[in-house]
Structures are given as C-alpha cells and as structure tokens.
Image (cartoon, rainbow, N blue to C red):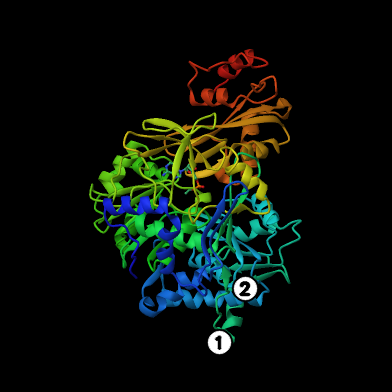
Amino acid sequence: MSYPYQIKTLEDYKKDYNKSISDPESFWTPIAETFTWRKKWDKVLDWNFKDPKISWFSGGKLNITENCIDRHLEKNSNTPAIIWESNDPEEHHRVLTYKELHFKVVQFANVLRNNGAKKGDRICIYMGMIPELAIATLACARIGAIHSVIFGGFSAQAIADRLDDAKAEFIITCDGAFRGTKDIPLKSVIDDALVGNHTVKKVIVCTRTRTPVSMIKGRDVWWEDEIKKVETHGNPDLPAEEMDAEDMLFILYTSGSTGKPKGVVHTTAGYMIWTNYTFVNVFQYQPGQVHFCTADIGWITGHSYIIYGPLSAGATALMFEGLPTSPDAGRFWDIVEKYKVNILYTAPTAIRSLMAYGNDYINGKDLSSLKVLGSVGEPINEEAWNWYNVNIGKEKCPIVDTWWQTETGGVMISNLANVTPAKPSFATLPLPGILPCLMDENGSEIEGNNVNGNLCIKMPWPGIIRTTYGDHERCKQTYFSAYENKYFTGDGCMRDSEGNYRITGRVDDVLNVSGHRIGTAEVENAINMHAGVIESAVVGYPHDIKGQAIYAYVIYDGSHGDSNLSKQDIIQTVSRIIGPIAKPDKIQFVPGLPKTRSGKIMRRILRKIAEGDVTNLGDTSTLIDPALIELILEGKL
Ligand code: WTA
C-alpha cells in the first residue's frame, strides 16, 4: 500500500494543515477517494455544533471491513495482519495474514448470522486479548451490527448497566482470560451481569482458559461448535453488509462527570478515514513495519490503533495478551526483540512502572528495530519522557506524544514522527483538520501565546463523536454546550510561545488513573452502596506510577466495628460495582464533608488536602462548618 496523503516534511505539514482548515471539503476528498466505496458520497461535510449534527461523506456506501481486509487481498494477502503474543511466553505465538483474517472474519460473521444477528443489532464483546477478540469485532462490522467492547476488568454490575443502556441482544465472551498469573472468569461475570437482563438473546463463548463454565440451554453456545457448523457448509462467502457512511460502527462506554457512563458513538466512514489518516501520519508507518500498541482493545486506543487504523492501512499489528511486568519487567523488550517491532505505542503509566524496575530488564535486549515511540492516555512527565527516549529509543527514535480521547476517535494533537519537532511533555501541534482554541471561564477565547485555558475544538474532523447512545441531549450538554459552537474536551491546556500545546489534565470531575478514565461520581455511587456509608466524596491525588490515584473521604456509620475491615469492605464494594480499576487507594473516614450553604461539596479543598497542599486552602468562608476542615486535616492519611 502507498499512502499519498502521508506528510513527509514540515513544509508539507504546514501546507496540509492550512488547506484542511480553510477548505476541509477539498482537503478530505482525495484522501477519501483512496478508500473502497460501494457508492461515492454526495456531500463531504455537513455540520452544526448547536444540535449537534455532524455528517461526513453522507450518501456514501461502504463496509469498513472491505477497507480493513478485502482491499489488501489482491497484493498483500500473505502480509501478517495480526501477530498475537500470548500471556505465557512459552505458548506459541499466532500470526494471521490478511488472507487468514479474511477467512476467519467471514467465518465468524456467518456464525453471527446463523445466531440471528443482523445490521443494527448491538453486540457486546467481553473477551481477553486473543485474536478472536479482533475477529469478533470485525465480524460485527462485516454484518453491520454495532459492537460495544467492554474492557475485561469491568465487573458484572458495570456490564449490566452497559448492556441495559445499549439494549444489547448478543454477547461474545470467553470462558476466561489470562492476565499475568491471574485467570479471570469472564463467562461467570457475564452470567452475573445477565441476572435480570431481558434483551440478550444469545451468548457466544470462546474457549481460552478452560475454566469450568455453566452453559444455559437455548442462550449460551460455544464459539468452536458454531464454527464447526459453518465449516460443514463450506464457510459460505459472506458479502459485507452495505453501510451508509454515517451508520453506527460502534458504541464505547466511557466515564464522565456524572455517575452513569456514556456510550460514545462513532460512525463508519469518518472514523475509518480518521484512524487511518492519523495512524499513517503520526507514526509515519511504512509498509512492512510491525506496529505494537500495548493497549487493550476494550479501550479506544485498542479500537483505533490495533484494529481499524493499522488494518485499514494494510499494516501489521501486534496484539499482546499479557501484562508489561509478567513474568518480569522485561516483557515488552522481549517482545520488541522477538518480532523486531518498529513502532511501540504505550502509556506513561507503563513507562513509569517499568522505569521503577531499573535497567537490568533492558540490558542485553536488542531494541535496534525500533524506529518510533508513542505515548498516550495521560500527560507524560519529563522524567518518564527522558527515560523512554534514552533507554528505549536510544535517542534515535522520535517520541510522539499523542493527545486524544474516546470521543475524538483518533489522535488530535501530536508531533509527527521525524516530520514535526517533539518537545518533552508537550503534545505539540494539531493534526490537519483540527482547529484547537483555549477558552476562559467566561466563555471568551484566549488569544496569543504563553496562555492557559480550557481546550476546545472549533470545527469538526472526520472522527468526532456523533452522539451518546440513546441520549443525544447528553452529548449536546456534555460537549457542545459549555462553549457556544465549540467541542469542549474537558481538558485544561497551555499554549507556549511557539504555539505548542501542553495538556495539563482534566478540568472536570474525571480522574485519569493509570491512563484509565474514571468518574469521581461513579466511584462515589459505588462507595455509597456499602451499607455503613452515609456519604462520600472522591478526588484524585498525584501518584508516581499511576499518574493519579483515588482518595475517598467517607462518612461512615462506625457501629459496624473495626475501621480497617470496614475500609477493606468498601474497597471490595467498589470492585464489585465497577471493577478493580476503580478501587480507592486511600479511604479516610471523616465526621462530615465540607459543603457550601447551597449544599455543594467543596472538592477543591478536599483535593488540596489529598494532595498534601494544605498551606493555602483558599477561601473557606462560604463553608457551613469551617471547623470541619481542621478535623479532616487531623485525620489525613
Ligand atoms: C488524557 C485515551 C495528556 C486527557 C486516548 C484526555 C492525555 C483523556 C493524553 C482521554 C496525552 C490522553 N497527554 N493527556 N498525550 N492522551 N490524555 O478517552 O485527559 O481514555 O481527555 O482516551 O486522557 O482518555 P480516553
């Protein structure tokens, strides 16, 4: 494959950027023309941010899997599409060429059809990181069903809420998943999630861990048995469903400021073009290279940079089932050496944790294949940036610090490897198509350089969120109402003297723990489920490895006994309601929460106390009970 739209020089970047902003329609037309369409679009872009209503390439017909698989078959059928490395370094790896991936996706698409799935149905996928997860995702897209992948770390209750919101009709899962030394019983979690569910008709279970599972007659079927049925019919070719450019491709749930996760909706053509364009340009992918994105497919990074971006570009994507520290902290470097990885894309939290293990795990490993390093998910501090640069990139690999969100579909602000300059801890410049601005508290744009503000985007790009599933008003309120005619990111940001952007972190009630987005309200709701809890308030505080950690202030009815045991109980409750990723790191029992006269919890103060920054707590005069602060400070952990 060649990528005529791959930017090669700084001058080209500037030229393309200016064109993309002044005339987006003629900028995106030739790019879109390189893809496979059943019918060409009528109009490149139609939009208003008021409703919001955004459509890219409307009237166009296509199927994303024809672009991710079929169109590579003529010239690249034997190119590896997915290389899979097991959790267990002793287990043999698997390679799926584009031809094999095609075969397997068509085969599983047949399974879905045989089980009654069709265009528009919502299919929830809850699996570990095995090739079948990618196959299942693509098979949904092939038949036009809307996939909703749920990260394997979420609990039964969290899944139940998502199934309910999406009104999912099908689930694809595994018996279990391997993660380091753990074996997570996915099917049993699904069984719990399905108690009281009325929409799910079928559960397809793929074998991975051989953990015993119970199968419910009429509802549960084995992946392998269903495949056999298709095989006896000779795996009939399954032409991809013709989709409208703006038909939903997937729902991905993410946390926001309220207690209820929202289903971010991406549609077909715009998302495809955006993930492809950003993949090719940010990483400067060259055909034949091996791209290793360490994210889980349960998060947007896995959707966009393991599946859709790389595969639409005919690239080779490496998919890893395990953990960076298992069996030891050299696991990533062993993988880089084994597969001669060219591009490594990971999160600052992983970098910081590996950094803490020291260089013994790197010494002696051949990392010379690496050409480009990437970072995503949270701000990367300078120390981690330098360590990554010196020890992994050997000061020869550009580091792309990619800022983006579930809602943006693909990378928005980043340097382009070897094309535009990097600056440690800065995401640097916007990609073509992206017009950022900084806004102040009063809704005015902050012009000029060396300024700080709330990051907004002024015009649509192809990968922008279209709606929040089942609740368009929520999409409007969350992203398009804070500032008129702008998409509000929820992030704070500074712009330096050269126009480089540096993301400073969330300005709403969303935490970023180890690169995972968690809403404080969600954690509070979970804590409040515990019988002894009267009220709680959750804030983040800085953590060396995780970036942010969770601090919970809890008003607890002490009559239930030992306070340490009670804290363990509360942690268990959160784990059961959301999942282990949302467990509070610290719980402090408090006699009350600082509130204003209107009943609002003063989180700013709680945040400062959790951060240990108690010299200047700011104005506390509006509090109902200022004396409470002293008591909270005395009990601080
Ligand atoms: C944060 C992950 C600083 C940011 C792709 C954003 C970052 C949230 C960066 C989205 C970065 C992501 N530098 N902060 N390079 N990348 N973030 O939806 O706060 O899981 O709003 O998407 O992560 O998280 P999400």
Q: Between 117 and 565, which is closer to the camera in this rendering? A: 117
Give the mark count. Answer: 2
- Asked if ligand 1 lies within 8 A of label 2, the reply is no
Quick check: 133 above or below 359? below
- Residue 407: image location, x then y, percent: 53, 50
Disc ID at residue 112: 2
- Calculate the distance from the C-alpha at mark 1 to the C-alpha at mark 2: 16 Å
- Is residue 315 visible in the rendered image? The answer is yes
- Residue 613: image location, x then y, percent: 48, 21
Q: Which residue is located at x 43 percent, y 31 percent?
A: 452
Q: Which residue is located at x 68 percent, y 74 percent?
A: 116
Horizontal side of 436 relative to 540 (left or right) equals left
Residue matched to label 1: 234
- Residue 23: image location, x then y, percent: 42, 54
Q: Between 232 and 503, which is closer to the camera in this rendering? A: 503
Quick check: 334 above or below 208? above
- Residue 373: image location, x then y, percent: 32, 51
Q: Which residue is located at x 62 percent, y 33 percent?
A: 567
Callout 2 crowding tier (Cα within 10 Å): few <14, some 14–19, many ≥20? many
